[in-house]
């Protein structure tokens, strides 16, 4: 938790808007799923992203949600196959 939280704060744009990062890494930061936590909603709300740009950003986040849900479900099924419950 002590290592993950600072990483999450930076990758979501809570500490510094992702648009202020260097151009070399800005594209990668915009494509990662944590951008949708803080940075993308603020960009849409303030009007920086409008029309097709906003639709693309929302579609990207929907895609991340589907990918992560499928991975989570697969992981849960794997764990449940190995689960052994004792007691009665």
Image (spheres, rainbow, N blue to C red):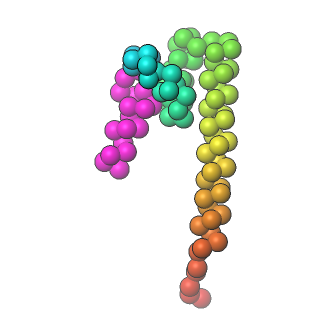
Where 80 falls versus 68 (above or below)? below
In which image quadrant can residue 55 be found? top right
- Residue 25: % across, % down: 44, 23
Q: Is residue 38 left or right of residue 74?
A: left
Residue furthest bottom in the image: 88
Residue 30 counted in the magenta span: no
Residue at coordinates 60% horizontally, 73% vertically from top-left?
A: 82
Quadrant where the C terminus sits is bottom right
Quarter location, residue 86: bottom right
Farthest residue to the left: give it.
2
The foreground one among 22 and 73 is 22
Counting labels gives 0
Residue stretch in magenta: 1-17
**Measuring 65% from the left and 55% from the top, which residue is drawn there?**
73
Q: Position of residue 35 (x, y in %)?
A: 51, 29
Q: Left or right of 16: which side holds 51?
A: right
Asked if the stretch drawn in magenta spans residue 14, the answer is yes
Where residue 17 sits: x, y (%)?
A: 41, 21
The residue at 53%/17% (across/down) is 43
Q: Which image quadrant for residue 74?
A: bottom right
7 over 60 or under it: above or below: below
Residue located at (64% from left, 48% from top)? 69
């Amino acid at each position: 938790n002590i290592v993950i939280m600072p990483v999450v704060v930076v990758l979501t744009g809570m500490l510094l808007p992702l648009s202020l990062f260097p151009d070399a890494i800005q594209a990668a930061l915009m494509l990662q799923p944590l951008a949708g936590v803080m940075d993308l909603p603020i960009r849409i709300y303030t009007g920086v992203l409008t029309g097709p740009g906003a639709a693309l950003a929302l579609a990207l986040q929907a895609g991340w949600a589907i990918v992560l849900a499928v991975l989570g479900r697969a992981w849960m099924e794997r764990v449940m196959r190995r689960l052994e419950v004792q007691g009665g």
